[in-house]
Image (cartoon, grey):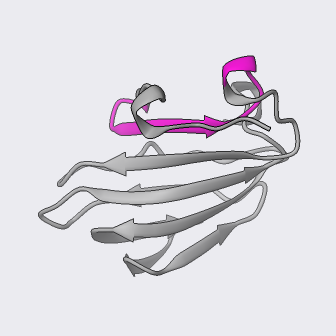
Amino acid sequence: MKLFRKEDVQPFYASKNEIVRQYTGRKEKHGNSKHHSLAVVTILPGLSSDPHSHKVAEESFLVISGSGIMEIDGRRFEVKAGDCVFVQPGETHTVINLGSEPLECVLATGPAWHPEDSF
């Protein structure tokens, strides 16, 4: 068992516009999880994540605040707090914040995210 407190989890930039606070994952400081990872991703107003896909990982994005657009393989969906989007391996996706407040999503990835799986 490991407890992760928000104040102890340092945010980092996964791409130029994604602020990520990773709670669980493959590294020892994230609990050495291999089967899933859990993070909170923040996209500031007017910005978007880089389009990318994963060879193996599935991802679920649960929007917890803000609103925006989720684009998956060229199809766009409006998303807002309470919406959940499931992305399958190989689907190219990006999150776009067209709102006036930060767009925050809880991101669950399985198996646990690692950089070699993103392209």
Residue located at (48% from left, 80% from top): 83
- In this rendering, the answer to whether 114 lies above or below 95 is above
Q: Establish if 15 lies above or below 65.
A: above
Residue found at x 36% / y 48%: 42
From which residue to which does the magenta span run? 14-29
Q: Residue at x 81, y 44 (%)?
A: 55
Whether residue 25 appears in magenta in the rendering, the answer is: yes
- Would you identify the image quadrant in which residue 80 lies? bottom left
- Depth check: give the residue in front, 4 or 119: 4
Q: Give x and y (percent) for residue 106.
A: 52, 58
Query: What x and y, as percent, mark residue 39?
Result: 56, 45
The answer to whether 108 is drawn above or below residue 17 in the figure is: below
Vertical placement of residue 85 versus 61, above or below: below
116 left or right of 108 in image:
right
Quadrant where the C terminus sits is top right
Residue that sits furthest to the left in the current view:
100
Return the x and y of residue 78 as percentages of the image width and height: 38, 80
The quadrant in which the N terminus is found is top right
